[in-house]
Amino acid sequence: MSVVPAEIAGIGSTALKLRVATGFDPMKSGVGPEEYFVLSRIDGSQTLREVLLATGLPLERAIQIVQRLRAIGALLLPGEAAAPATASTPTPVRPAVPQTPRTLTPMPPTRPSTANIAISRTLTPMRRPASGTGTDEPTAADRILDTTLPNLTAQERAVLAEVVELDDGDRRKILAVARLLGGNDPYEILGVPHGADKKALKRAYFRLSKDIHPDRYYGKKLGSFGPRLEMVFEAVRRAYATLTEGGARASSQHPTVRDTSADQPQTPQEYAAELYERACALEVGGDALEAMKLFAAALRVDPQPRYLRRAATCALAAKQPKTALEYAKKAQSDAPDDPSSARLLAMAFRAAGKLADAEEVLVMAMAMKSENDVLLGELRNDLAEVRRLLTNG
Amino acid sequence: MASDKVIGIDLGTTNSCVAIVEDGTPSVIPNRGGYKTTPSMVAIAENGKRLVGHIAKRQAITNAENTVYASKRLIGRKWGSAAVRSSLEIMPYRIVEGPHDDVRIMLRDQVFSVPEVAAYILQEMKLISDEYLGEEVQKAVITVPAYFNDGQRQATKDAGRIAGLDVIRIINEPTAAALAYGFGRSIDRKVAVYDLGGGTFDISILEIGNGVFEVISTAGDTFLGGEDFDRRIIDWLVFGFEKQHGIDLRKDKMALQRLKDVAEKAKCELSSVKETEINLPFIISTGRNEALHLQTMLTRDKLEELTSDLVDRTVEICARTLEEAEIPKTAIEDVILVGGMTRMPRVQQMVAEFFGLEPCKGVHPDEVVALGAAIQGAALTDEKSDILLLDVTPHSLGIMIVGGYFHRLIEQNTTVPTSESHIFTTVKDNQTSVKILVLQGESDRAEENELLGEFVLTGLRRAPRKEVEIDVTFHISADGIVSVKARDLETSLEQSITVTATSGLTEDEIKKMVDANKDYMVEVRSGQEFEKARHTAEKALEEIEGLFPQVTDAIAGSDFGQDAVKKARAVVERTRQAIAAKDITSLTDATEALNRTLNMFRGVVSKTRG
C-alpha cells in the first residue's frame, strides 16, 4: 500500500511545497539519521508528495518523519514567515506544546486518508478556549492555528489586556486569524491547502465562522473585539466567496481523481491530459455539463487552446452561454487567424444574445483566407442566420 | 420574576405560534385552549374590551367591522402603496390614513396603528409563554417573511417593544424553518425552503453543515399567500350568487365575513377530500322579508383551476431565485415545505415536479417557523448551543447618485455582518456639500427604491467638479442594523447615520427630493478607471490604424474583405465615440471588440506573410 494521502495531519495538503526553516539547526534539534535524510530532500521546489515518494522509505514512516520535522519547527509551509531566532536552541521553534506529542503518534497504517476521519470531529463545541486545557485538539483537517502569537505587537498586547468578556483562548484565536489577513491569500485565510475543493472550503469557512462570527459572542462586552470580529469575519467570508464563486465553481470535481493515479507521480500535463480524456468521454456520453467541469479543471492545470475550444463547445451544449463565451474569447485570442475559433466565438456570442458581436466576428472570419470550403459555407450560413435574427429582433 | 429565556414567535398572517428551547429541546408552547397556534386576530367588542386570538375569531362574523385579521399585510406599509389600496377593498374593517403616510385601523371609535395591533397578538403570545413557564419572558426572536423590507422589519420590532418584549433578533421565516429542520441532525447539504403562508410566499436556499446554516439566496412575493387562494373561492361564490340572484354579496360585511370563513374551511377540507359542500343559509336578505341561501359544491379540481396561476407564480419565483443564485436545480438535496398552504396537494405536486424530489415530510408546516425562532434565540444566548446562522441582507443597499440613479454598495443576499466603501465625487464646481440618500431596493432608479435615511456632509473645499472625493461606507451589523458614513477624503471630515425605520416618505416625495437636491448630488468616481481604459483603447486604435493598409491588401481578394474592413472601421469609430463621451461602460465594451478585431487583423497579416 503506497498511496500518498491528499492531506497529512499537522501539515495539510501533500501538494504543498515545503521548505526548511532558515536558522533551523538539525545538529542541536536531536533529529535522527532518517529524519536528517528526509530533511535533506526538502528543497522548496518539490511538493511534499514528491518528497515522500522520493525518500525510498516506507510511506508511513516517511509521513511520520515529516510530521515530526514539522512539529519541531524544521519545516515551513508556503507563505509562512521564517521562525524566530530561538530556532538554534533545542526547544521546539513553535512552542505549540499540546500539539507536539499528538502529532508524534503514529498514524493508523490502514487509514492513510486521515483527513476524512478528522472531519467528523470538528463537530465538537467550539466555544471552549483554544489553548490552555489541551482538550480542544485541532483535528488533522484543521489548520493548526498558531494561537501562541509570537512577536506580539504593542497593539496586540494592548488588545489582549483589554477588559472584555472573552476568555484568553478566544482572544488569541481572533487575533491569530486577524494576523493571516495581511497575507491576502484566500487559501491561507481559510486555512486550507491551495487547490482545496469546494467541500473543503465550505468546511473551513463554516468552522472558522463558528469561531469568529459576532453572533457567537452575542450579548458579551467585546470592546475593541467587536469591530475586530466583524472585520475578521468579513475577510474570511470574502476569501470564501473569492474561492467559490465563478471559476472555482467547477472545482467541486470528483475527489477520486487524484487518488486513482497516486502510485506514480503525475506531471500536471499528464494530469490535465487525463482530465481532458475523461471530459471527452463524458461529452461523447452526452453529459455536457459534467464534461464542461472537467474541461475547466484541465484548463486550470494546463491551459491549452485545444482544451479551451472543447470546453467552449461543451459549455454551449450544456447551455452555459456565459462560460462558453469566456472560453471562446480566450480560444479566439490564442488563435486569432483561425476562422474556426472565430466561428466558435460567434456562436458563443449568439448564445449569449450578443448578435451584433456575433455578426462582427463572422464577417471578420469570412475575410480570413481559408482552404476549407465547408467551413466557409458554415460561416456563410451562420452569418445569414445571425443577420436574420438581427433584423427580426 | 424576570427570565433570561428567549421565546421564538412566528407572527403569521393568519395564525401565530410561540416556541422555546428548554434543556436543548425546542418545543411549541400550547395556548390556554391547548392549541399550538393562535389566530392572528384582534377585535374590539361592543363593551370596548380587546379580544385576541381564538375569542376574536369566534366573534368575527357578528363583529366583522371591528375585527382585524391579516394585519401583517399592512405592517410597515405606506398608505399610498398598492398593497394597502387592495386591502382597502377586501378588508371588512376600516383602514384609514395615518399622519405619516402610514396606515391606521379604526375599530369602533378608536384608531390603532398597525404595530399596535401586531403588539396585541405578540402580547398574547408572551402571556401564553409566561403562563406556561411560570415566569415572565422578556426576550424574543420574531420571524418575518424573507422579503420584508427594512420598514416592515422595524415596524415588527416596534410591535415587539409595544408588547413589552426585547426583540433580540428578527429572522426570516424560511431561515427559521431551515434551523428547525436541521436542528440536532448532522446534515451537510443544500436545501430549499418553500414557504407559502397565509399572506406571503418565500423561497430560500441554504447550505447546512456542521451546525452552520448559511443563507445563500432568498426571494419571494409579499403579496401571495393563502388569503389569495381564499379570495379566489370567495370571488367564485360571489360571482355564482350574483348570476343567480343579481345580488353582490361583497356589499354586505357580515356576508363577506361568512364567505371568508367558509372559503378557508373549504380550501382546507379539499386538501384531504375531493369535493366539499358549501352551505351558507340565510346569507342575505332581499329586503322583502325573505332570505336567500348559498348552497353549492366545490371540487378539488375546480379549486385547482381557480388558483392554478397562483401556484404557477410560486414556481416561477423558485426558478428565478435559483437562476439568480446560479444554483442548478439538481444541486438542491432537500425541499422543506412551510406554511399551511403547502398542505394543498397541488402545491406539493408542483414543488415535487419542479425540484424533481419529494419534499421533506419531517417538519410540521405550522410549527416549524416558531421552533426555528426559538432555536436562534438559544443560539444567541445559550453558551451550550452549537448553532450558527449566517444570514443575509434581503435587499441591496446604496445611495442616490446624480441623475436620480441608484448606486448599489451592498448587493442583496450578502452575508452579514458586512461593509462596503466606494468613492464618489462632487458634480458641480464649488460644491461645498453633498447629500447622501440611503436607499434600499433593486431598481436602478432611486425613486423606485425605499428611502431609509439621509444626511448632509458639509464643509467641502471649493473646487472644480469631480475634484473633491467623498468616501461612502455602508455597514450592516450581524443584527441587521445599517449605518452609513461619508467622509471627505481631503479634510477627513465625516458624517454618519444609523438607519432606523422611516415612515412617511412617498415615492413622490423622493422624486421631489431628487429634483430639489440636484446641486448636492454625488457622482461615481470614474475618472481614474476611465483614463486607464482610454489609454488601453488608444494604444489599440493606433495599432489597428497601422494595420489597415496591410489588411486591406491581404483580404482584398476575398468576397467578404470589404465587409470586414467596414465592420472594423465601425468598431474603431465606436471606440472613438466612447472616448469622446467619456463613458466608461461603452468604452470597455468597445475596447473589447476593438481588441478582438485587432487580434484578427494580426492573424490575417501574419498568415499572408507566412
Image (spheres, grey):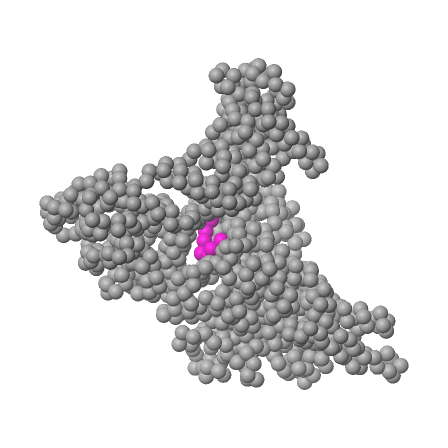
Res B4 visible: no
- In the image, residue A102 sits, relative to residue B62, either above or below, namely above
Which span is picked out in magenta? B414-421
Of residues B317 and A321, the one nearer the viewer is A321
Q: Position of residue B401 (x, y in %)?
A: 57, 44
Residue at (76% x, 79% y) in the render: B279
| Residue for point 56% across, 44% down | A319
Q: Residue at x 57, y 24 (%)?
A: A372
Position of residue B504 measured from the top left corner of the image (x, y, whole percent): 63, 60
Q: Position of residue A58 (x, y in %)?
A: 20, 49
The image quarter in which residue A390 lies: top right
* Magenta segment, prevailing SS (helix, strand or loop): strand
Can you tell which quarter of the image residue A266 is in?
A: top left
* Furthest-right residue in this view: B288
From the viewer's perspective, tell me whether residue B259 is left or right of residue B28: right
Q: Is residue B111 magenta?
A: no
> Residue at the location (69% across, 73% down)?
B274
